[in-house]
Image: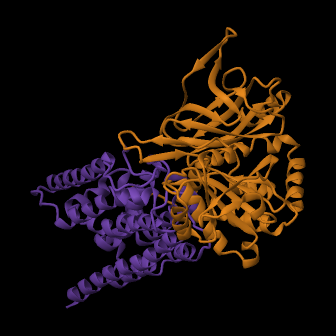
Amino acid sequence: MPSLRFAPASLLVVALALVSACSRDGSPNAEERGAMTGFRGVTLASPIPKPSFTLMDQDGKPFDFGRETQGKVALLFFGYTHCPDICPLHMANIAAVLRTMPVEERNAIRVVFVTTDPERDTPARLKEWLGAIDPSFVGLTGSKAAIDSAQVALGLRVAEREYLEGADSSNYYVAHAAQVIAFARDGNAYTIYPNGIRQQDWANDLPKLARDASGRAIRAELAAMERAGGGIGMAAPEAAVTMRGIEIPVAVIAAPLSRSEASLYLTIVNGTAQDDELIGIATAVAGMTMLHESLPSGGMEMLASAPIPAQGELRLEPGGRHGMLMELTKDLKAGDTVFVTLTLKRAGALEAAAVVVPYADLEKILGGRQR
Amino acid sequence: MQFWCAASGTAWTWTWRPYPGVWLFVGLLAFAVLRWNRAGARRSGKTASPIPPRFFVGLGVLWLALDWPIGALGAGYLASVHMLQFLLIALVAPPLLLRGPSADAIAMIPSRRLLGPVLQRLTTPVTALIVFSTIVLLTHLPAIVDALMVSQPGSFAIDMAWILAGLLFWWPVVRDVPAHRFPPPARIGYVVLGMMFSPVMFGLVGFLVYSTTPLYGVFELAPPLAGISSRADHQTAGVLMSVGGAFIAFVSLSIIFFKWTKESA
């Protein structure tokens, strides 16, 4: 019988190679973001000031968001209590981490859940649902118009109902923004937390946010990060890692010369084993969006969808396929962050934070990150 | 339709879903053992005896662990069910499955050019224990679980690794391999070291039970099932690995001991 020298340790080598092969190259994950910026949330190139709105809380009393959260960290999320996945997940993960924090840090944080489904989410329903997660969480409801305007003020896509095929009209989902916006104690949001943020990420960021009463330390940390990354180049492509298996390592909008239209460039990496398709782009800053492809002849073709192969990627880039944002509702300046909702046929809606960059910087950003 | 259970990110429903890959795998396994036994009988000039019922019990356990609902829940929703799957696939099913091949079928292995020497080496107790522990450790590392469970081939690879690890681990205990001189006291020590007081399993249990944040992203970020927190789910997984592993070890130790005393008498 031939002898065979088998080394069990080779198993370890094979497995480690497997892990390396499985790991992404491209967008930083929350842990890598933490190493770069100190924060595991997605840092915004320009902070979002805290909006002012008053809605009704779960006890039926008016709640002035600006006043009630003044001097505190405010974690603001738009969702609905019948949500099967993202909403209970975000709320449960935040609650789990808050329970492990010292009382003084915990008291510096308020979690505010604004329903995007006011019809079903009555104050009583909000109280029952949030009470089961963490009774200290604030649930807000109000008229659809008031809730919509709060979303618009934050640059979020306004939530919409999605009716299930064949189901009655009371049975529906609500497509809504998937990120928690974290307002620091100085009233500005420097970081957002997309779907996919884990408890360990919250455990890293929440104490930092809670301890920094003036926001000075956060600004200093982010400024140092920006300097280390060469200005906008570091902050700009931090689009959200949005869903398991699907990533958006880079999303930028070329700063438009006029208010009529702007181009959206991004990469969607499909790490799953199934083909997918980009079938829709939506954002609160554009009245109309389209998917275009530049033709070699110099013309432009409108596309209904763009394929994202399994274990592959879709690139929207200058001179090729790209998103068109038309009928802009606000002036877009370099450094602005725009939330874009991308609808994929299989994976559903994904949220990306696209940063507006000068046209001259596009090559540098996309060249370095995409090619 | 999915071929094999994998994390899908969609909310859990109790609506039955078919996984034809699981049926195909279980069917092929039964067919392969049947063919193997027939070939063994032909080679030794005997009539093939029927496959012992314990093999089919093992096949049933494997099917139960891989198919809906345990397979689907364990692949993408609950770490505790994932651990139950591990116990069933790697620790419960293999010793039963190993009863399937007849002695004549097993006797064919050494004559196989590549498989023979590989299997002979892999099923020596020390190597089997090292391979089993390595596979158990690797297939429970968060980076590997999170990377593989989101795809069907990845999830399939983990399940196959568990079956392979289980078959190798149990081989020296269940099958008589005279060349290895593995008497009952040594078997008892082997099971105790590999399962009851396995440093690998102890380490994993410690991380699962005492970690302040959930170990596996794939289960932490799965659409939640009402009333089950991610931390409680991970802690249950740790307890299952500890108590379940010890229970299976206890049952197998009892069987080894009673067989030993019976043979001695």
Q: Quadrant of the C terminus of chain B?
A: bottom left
Asked whether the viewer can see residue B51, the reply is yes
Looking at the image, residue A192 sits to the left or right of residue A270; the answer is right
Among all residues in the image, which is located at the extreme bottom? B265
Place of residue B85 in the rendered image (x, y in percent of width and height, measured from the top left): 39, 64
Looking at the image, residue A10 sits to the left or right of residue A192; the answer is left
Depth check, front residue: A239 or B80: A239
Q: Quadrant of the N terminus of chain B?
A: top left
Depth check, front residue: A273 or B125: A273
Place of residue A141 in the rendered image (x, y in percent of width and height, measured from the top left): 60, 56
Which residue is at a point 31% across and 66% down the rendered structure image? B93
Place of residue B133 in the rendered image (x, y in percent of width and height, measured from the top left): 48, 69
Depth check, front residue: A369 or A179: A179
Among all residues in the image, which is located at the extreme front? A61
Above or below A221: residue A144: above
Depth check, front residue: B154 or A280: A280
Which residue is at a point 44% across and 51% down the rendered structure image? B6
- Rendered hue of chain A is orange
Instruction: Quadrant for residue B187, please give it.
Output: bottom left
Which residue is at a point 52% across and 70% down the rendered structure image? A132
Instruction: Quadrant for residue A284, please give it.
Output: top right
Looking at the image, residue A342 sits to the left or right of residue A334; the answer is left
Which chain can be seen in purple?
B
